[in-house]
Image: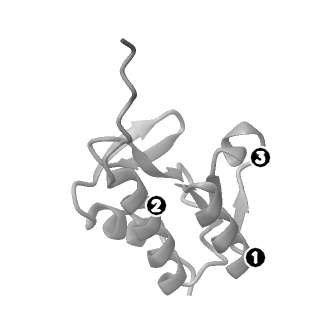
Amino acid sequence: MPMTPDRVRKLALGLENAREAPHMERVAFRTPRRIFATMAGDGADVNLMFDADLQAHYCAMAPEAFAPVPGGWGKMGATRCDLTSVDEATFRSALAAAHARANAPLPKRKSKK
């Protein structure tokens, strides 16, 4: 059964510190630090914000459902998930991975002295 926009929203907002906010023509799900997913206005797909390793993992595991976003965003880990092709267990796993990455503390910057 394909994922619905309502189910995506419920799962995303059920994660720790998650909230919804508008983001261009999409809706963003974010932690206080950063966005972990955006959903198309028509609910057809979700872009998940992965690192390169997570992107490679999900694209290899379910190539019918996951693909890098075209262009520079995809090279930085942004990954499109086709909601008509993904099962709920795989989507939940991917969403949790993107959320964990966004909820992690940012690396400390080296100070210039």
Label 1 SS:
loop
Q: How is the image coloured?
A: one colour
Q: Distance from label 1 to label 2 (Cα)?
A: 19 Å
**Mark 1 or mark 3, which has the lower sequence index?**
1
- For mark 3, what is the residue? 70
Q: Quadrant of the N terminus?
A: bottom right
Q: Nearer the viewer, mark 3 or mark 2?
A: 2
The secondary element bearing badge 3 is classed as loop
Residue 100 position within the rendered picture, expressed as x and y whole percent measured from the top left: 37, 62
Mark linked to residue 64:
1
Q: Are marks 3 and 2 in contact (CB under 8 Å)?
A: no
In the rendered view, would you say 49 is above or below 6? above
Please state the horizontal and vertical placement of residue 3, each as a whole percent of the image: 52, 76
Q: Which mark is residue 10?
A: none
* Residue 62 seen: no
Disc 1 packing (10 Å; few <14; some 14–19; many ≥20)? few
Q: Amino acid at mark 3?
A: Pro
Q: Indicate the quadrant where residue 68 lies.
A: bottom right
Q: Residue 98 got which mark?
A: 2
Q: Amino acid at mark 2?
A: Ala
On screen, residue 81 versus residue 7, left or right, reads right
From the top left corner, tell me how far across and down residue 28 is, in percent: 42, 46
User: In the picture shown, does residue 94 fall above or below 87?
Assistant: above
Q: Name the N-terminal-most of marks 3 and 2.
A: 3
